[in-house]
Image: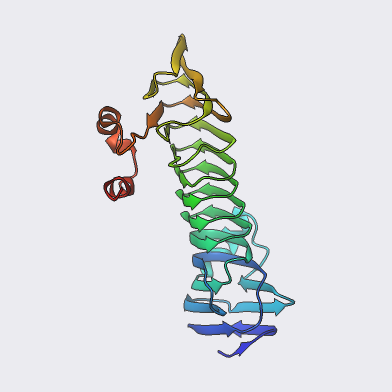
């Protein structure tokens, strides 16, 4: 493979493509495989480690990078079942951190890290991971595990089936929505102005800073509720339960609802997790979180 600041390339076998010109946006379309996108200070590049069936097509024009494997317009599950499942690729893209990224991966794992501008990921089946994404992030998928760590901009996640775990830094609004799957949210810093969680079938577990300023309104139509904050009251009508109240100034707002599932509100201690709640809900919390607490 060669390098250039503009032009078109066709990749038919594993290898590396160096892109010397500036890259401001990425639009990627892949039917099936594995995609890694990382923001780096060096020149942009594409590394292909596996490719089957059709070639990879790459276009760079005025800073707009377009990467397509196979049929670009496989936008539905039917399209993918007809022809897309035979097209598979594994590739990694190194891009400037301020690149605006738009990914469409129908089936396969996606990892995006160290980006500072808008990031959009769409898929049908496969795990999606965001790490160190500091711009507006939007994720839309049908089935798969979604994990976001150290997200400091607005984040909106929509899924049909699969758990959603978000460990966010101080920053933008949070909107998480799934039909079937657990929602786990960890806010180590200040609570964003607006946090909204919606689930039809699945548990909701939220952990807040030790002394947040937030107004809480969490409910379940069928499930238990528990809170580590004495300021939050529990109410119930028949099978439904609600956690509500104001902590501190109540400047931020936390809203959440699940039809069938438990709602748990955890509190960070000043130096460590509240021991009682940490032990009781240890199985519900991500295993990686214990290492974070031990390093504090």
Q: How many marks?
A: 0
Q: Quadrant of residue 254?
A: top right
Q: Position of residue 167 (x, y in %)?
A: 45, 46
Quadrant of the image containing the N terminus = bottom right
Farthest residue, direction bottom: 2
Q: Position of residue 9 (x, y in %)?
A: 64, 84
* Colour pattern of the rendering: rainbow
Residue 211 seen anywhere in this rendered image of the structure? yes
Is 242 on the left-hand or right-hand side of 282? Answer: right
In terms of depth relative to the viewer, which is nearer, 274 or 67? 274
Work out whether 190 lies above or below 104. Answer: above
Residue 12 seen anywhere in this rendered image of the structure? no
| Residue at left offset 40%, top offset 23% | 229
Q: Quadrant of residue 6?
A: bottom right
| Residue at left offset 30%, top offset 46% | 287
Farthest residue, direction top: 238
In terms of depth relative to the viewer, which is nearer, 212 or 5? 212
Work out whether 260 lies above or below 48. Answer: above
Q: Position of residue 115 (x, y in %)?
A: 56, 62
Work out whether 88 lies above or below 82. Answer: below
Q: Position of residue 210 (x, y in %)?
A: 40, 33
In terms of depth relative to the viewer, which is nearer, 130 or 1? 130
| Residue at left offset 56%, top offset 58% | 106
């Amino acid at each position: 493979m060669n390098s250039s600041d503009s032009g078109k390339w066709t990749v038919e076998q594993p290898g590396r493509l160096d892109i010397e010109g500036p890259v401001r946006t990425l639009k990627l379309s892949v039917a099936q495989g594995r995609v890694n996108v990382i923001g780096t200070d060096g020149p942009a590049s594409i590394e292909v480690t596996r490719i089957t069936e059709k070639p990879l097509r790459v276009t760079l024009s005025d800073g707009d990078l377009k990467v397509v494997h196979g049929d670009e317009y496989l936008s539905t599950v039917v399209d993918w079942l007809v022809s897309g499942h035979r097209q598979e690729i594994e590739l990694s893209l190194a891009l400037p951190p301020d690149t605006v990224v738009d990914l469409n991966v129908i089936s396969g794992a996606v990892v995006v890290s160290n980006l500072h501008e808008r990031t959009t990921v769409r898929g049908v089946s496969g795990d999606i991971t965001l790490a160190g994404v500091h711009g507006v992030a939007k994720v839309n998928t049908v089935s798969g595990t979604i994990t976001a760590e150290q997200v400091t901009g607005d984040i909106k996640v929509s899924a049909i089936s699969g758990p959603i775990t978000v460990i966010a830094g101080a920053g933008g609004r949070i909107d998480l929505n799934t039909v079937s799957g657990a929602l786990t949210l960890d806010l180590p810093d200040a609570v964003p102005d607006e946090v909204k969680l919606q689930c039809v079938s699945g548990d909701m577990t939220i952990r807040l800073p030790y002394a947040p300023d937030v107004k809480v309104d969490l409910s379940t139509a069928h499930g238990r509720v528990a809170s580590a904050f004495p300021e939050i009251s529990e109410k119930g009508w028949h099978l439904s339960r609600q956690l509500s109240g104001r902590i501190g100034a109540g400047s931020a707002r936390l809203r959440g609802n699940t039809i069938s599932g438990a709602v748990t509100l955890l509190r960070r201690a000043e130096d460590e997790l509240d021991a009682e709640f940490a032990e009781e809900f240890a199985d519900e919390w991500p295993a990686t979180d214990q290492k974070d607490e031990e390093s504090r």
